[in-house]
Amino acid sequence: MNVRSLTSFTTVLILSTASAQSAVSLTQGVTAALTNNSDVKTAQANLQKAQAASKAAQADPSTLAAAKLSARSSEAQAEAQLHGARLSTLQNTIAAYTALLEAQENVELQTLQVQVDQKAVQVAQVKLKVQNATALDVQNAQNTLSGSQQNLADAKAQVNLASARLSTLTGLGSGARASGITAGPKLSATLTKLQQGLPELSSVISSTNDVAAQQLAVKLADNDFTPARTLSDARTALANAQRSLDSAQKSASQTLASAYQSAQNSSELLDVTQSRETAAQKTYTQDAARLKSGTISAIELQNSQLTLKKAQYARLQAQDNVLEALAALSVAAGQNLTGIGGSL
């Protein structure tokens, strides 16, 4: 059985023991969240309202230039806010889903740890009987087992908490379980390419709209019949708006660069954990053969199995981190880079 099959088998075991609990894919979770999320619904309603207001303003010949510009700006802002709400919902759902998946896998890991520690107590007790261990050795083994049992209980509790969090975000029924995820897509877009989409971010559009409004104010005040003070104030307001726009652009660019670096780092870490998992799988396979040949004990094989399970869990965490980093980058870039949920 290969590494991926072992992970899939573990997930099947979890799901088979969860009676009356539904297995949910990440795509299903994201789709449900995008449909049911209150922020997305509010943003959709606001966009429809802004579109109607803008259409009416542009069609009304009595509407002044400033009002028409304001209506167009409000529509653009509402559209950007809806896009941002969808991306944020995507990010939050991915985080909740991966937390649930890791919690489920941690139950399996802690279960195996308890089994290993139970065997260690038995070994210590046998050694004590033949005077090859002390009572303190037995007590230490029992203390270790008690700690592992508490960790297992905590892990099970975390599954329920993570499931409730996912249910809240998606609107799905309680008791949902994560069915697993595939590796996230490779980051192929360059930072330069992603920076081209920054003008479409809600924060940047807001500042851009302010500049456009102040530019119009200057234009309308730049004549012989408007007081000079009005024009001066308009120019000052325009300069302030331009500085705010510059600040918003720089902030968006810095956030994007940081998110891009995090995505690259998470991908590199995944490569490391995959290599360690492969090595642990190889060792376990070799130890299984050694057990058959009688050169190691069943306890040693169980320890090898635990090492493999820890490596698999570390790889799962790294894999989840890649997807979460891509989700964060999606929010920063204003476009979906996760491969889940479409273009949004």
Image (cartoon, helix red, strand yellow):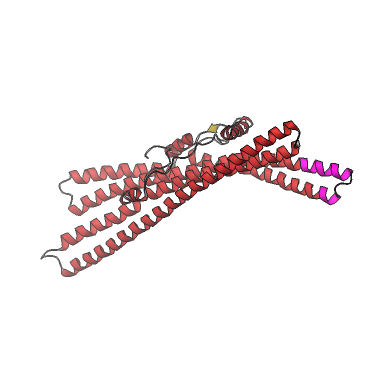
Report whether residue 161 is seen.
no
Count the labels in the image: 0
What type of secondary structure mainly makes up the magenta span? helix
Q: Residue most toward the bottom?
A: 229
Q: Position of residue 34 (x, y in %)?
A: 42, 39
Q: Tell me if residue 143 is in the magenta stretch.
A: no
Q: Position of residue 171 (x, y in %)?
A: 49, 37
Which residue is more in the foreground, 134 or 28? 134
Q: Position of residue 117 (x, y in %)?
A: 74, 43
Report whether residue 245 is seen.
yes
Residue 230 appears left or right of 184: left
Q: Residue most toward the left?
A: 224
Check the picture and name the quadrant holding the N terminus.
Answer: top right
**Residue plotted at (79% across, 43% down):** 121
Tell me which segment is drawn in magenta.
119-138
Residue 268 appears left or right of 122: left
**Residue plotted at (44% across, 45% down):** 327
Q: Tell me if residue 121 is in the magenta stretch.
A: yes
Which residue is more in the foreground, 70 or 115? 115
**Residue plotted at (58% across, 39% down):** 278
Check the picture and name the quadrant holding the C terminus.
Answer: top left
**Position of 54 relative to 22 (above/below):** below
Which residue is more in the foreground, 137 or 132? 132
Residue 252 appears left or right of 278: left
Residue 273 placement: quadrant? top right
**Residue plotted at (37% across, 58% down):** 251
